[in-house]
Image (cartoon, rainbow, N blue to C red):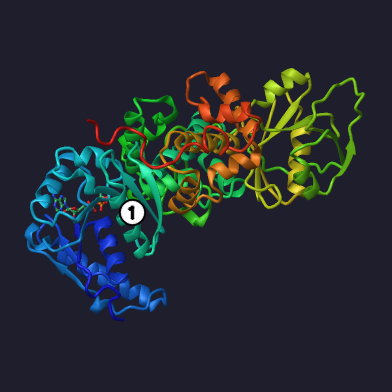
Amino acid sequence: MSAPFPDAPPVAVVGTGTMGAGIAQVAAVAGRRVRLLDAVAGAAERAVGRIRSQVKSQVARGRLAVDADALDITVAADLSGLAGCSVVVEAIAEDLTAKKTLFASLERVVATDCVLASNSSSLTPTAMGAGLAHPERLVGLHFFNPVPAMRLVEVISGLATSPAVAEQAAALGREWGKTVVHSAATPGFIVNRIARPFYAEAWRAYEERVASFAVIDAVMTGAAGFRMGPFALMDLIGHDVNEAVTRSVWAAFGFDPRFAPSLTQRALVEAGWLGRKAGRGCYGYPVAGGSGEHAAAGPVARASRVVAQDGIVPGLVTEYGPTSLSTLLARSGVRVLPGDPDDEMGLLDGTVELPCGVVLDRCNGATASSVSFALERPVIVVDRTLDDATASAIAIAASDGCPPAGIAEAVGLFRQAGMDVHVIDDIPGMIVTRTVAMLANLATDAVASGVASAQDVEVAMRLGVNYPRGPIAWGQQWGTRTVLTILDSLENWYRDGHYRAAPALRRAVLAGGGPLTGPGLSAAPGGPLPLPRNPT
Ligand SMILES: NC(=O)c1ccc[n+]([C@@H]2O[C@H](COP(=O)([O-])OP(=O)(O)OC[C@H]3O[C@@H](n4cnc5c(N)ncnc54)[C@H](O)[C@@H]3O)[C@@H](O)[C@H]2O)c1
């Protein structure tokens, strides 16, 4: 294949480790001439070898059609070898001083119209560009690991970044086969900021002894449709890496309780139980017998009442008013009787009565015991899902003192719908409900704060971390009012600021409970925060 850009100036990649080699690979495969530079002698040459063998294996699998040996990748002896490049992508160590020094040196070598891009995960172009002669040409170009496989790139504009440079960086990302989203230079950018609750809510649930790692993971995959459960994913990422991102975002937000790290994860890091790479993390590795359940590390969960026994399938249930449980009831094929509107028991709209008299309610952020207190009846709450019509698992929780027959009937009901049923302990927001409400909350907050457009947030979360649905669309599906009710209920229970609702969410509800992209969000343009660019 002839290079599509034979006359274009070469692209430089400085730092040829995990990310730099991946970035060089996608640039070269797209037809760019690439110049590599690394501080360690021989590292760039080794990266060229790795890239060619990676590309050959992709070609052998039929995923690429290029001549790996013909890719135009060469190694520069020093910075002066990058003089003719039109763009330099930096992927050196995550160290502000090192990056500032590199960009200052590059400025003395490259042409004035050369774009300087940084792949940093946490340092902003605002900070890295301070002191440069031309900070307007410095932009964040944040790829995801592994670069050749991950489709997303975040283009980050610092305070001084020129819109034309951001657009040049975006065009480059598209040319290299990536989907581009634009982010302001704020902590975690889009993905690493909004994704925090995926991990944090799992830790909080675990630390309240709600269920084991394996049960929480099973609920997050089987009910919520995530490709991996949070604990399995953190074991894969490495707890050192995952916790460092959490701590960096938390610190950058002034130790905002919404982003607080987990003590259990701290213990795993301190113990060196970093996940797969250490042979042990939340789970043990290699996985014995290929089973999904592994010995838990760290504090042992009480794993309350994880149900293994067969449930009793009830013949009929009684439904009080319109209920969000109807799809699940239809799947289980039970006969549903309408509740008596004059019933003195006064059951709430949306609840369902099991034959034994126990009430089923959809989780709206309150515990089963709180609902039970209000209704003066034993209650079982049902966690939310990605899609009730297709979910393969469901979590339920019973109020304190709920008769075992009620739990058995609820288990039978959902078993009959073909689902794995996980009976967890009774905490507000259960597992999926609290996680998705918080993802929608942080997504809303990011959009309303001008970090990115709602559309870019959705794309970033689906492509950057493979979410089955964008958090804003997910919140809209549940309803803005419901998401706010869940958050307020959680915040009222814990009173630690962790679940405080985004002002824009509250505003959307006050304006009629419209979509999350309603007032307060639609006005936000995305892109850089509106701070003065050229103060006089
Ligand atoms: N690893 C990830 O998952 C990931 C994802 C997104 C972004 N990032 C960011 O990408 C950057 C690189 O991360 P990585 O995981 O590839 O690191 P890495 O350790 O694999 O590679 C860094 C390379 O840079 C070289 N280097 C260090 N200082 C240098 C200098 N002054 N000049 C030239 N070369 C230098 C090192 O020799 C090494 O080869 C970091 O800023 C990181 O935050 C990493």
Q: In the rendered view of the protein, which quadrant contains the N terminus?
A: bottom left
Q: Which of 418 and 436 is in front in this view?
A: 436
How many callouts does the rendering have? 1
Snapshot quadrant of residue 385: top right
Q: Position of residue 223 (x, y in %)?
A: 62, 46
Tell me if I can see residue 423 in this picture: yes
Q: Does residue 360 sit above or below 214 in this rendering?
A: above
> On the rendered structure, is 369 left or right of 175?
right
Q: Which residue is rendered at x = 24% and y = 31% of the image?
A: 535
Tell me if I can see residue 384 in this picture: no
Q: Where is residue 466 in the image (x, y as percent from the top left)?
A: 48, 52
Q: Does residue 85 sit above or below 378 in this rendering?
A: below
> On the rendered structure, is 458 left or right of 76?
right
Q: Where is residue 96 in the image (x, y as percent from the top left)?
A: 19, 40
Q: Nearer the viewer, residue 199 or 124?
A: 124
Q: Which residue is rendered at x = 12% and y = 56% of the image?
A: 110
Q: Which residue is rendered at x = 36% and y = 35% of the image?
A: 529
Q: Where is residue 410 in the image (x, y as percent from the top left)?
A: 76, 38
Q: What residue did someone put label 1 on?
A: 167
Q: In the rendered view of the protein, which quadrant contains the C terminus?
A: top left
Q: Which amino acid does label 1 sit on?
A: Glu
> On the rendered structure, is 466 left or right of 83?
right
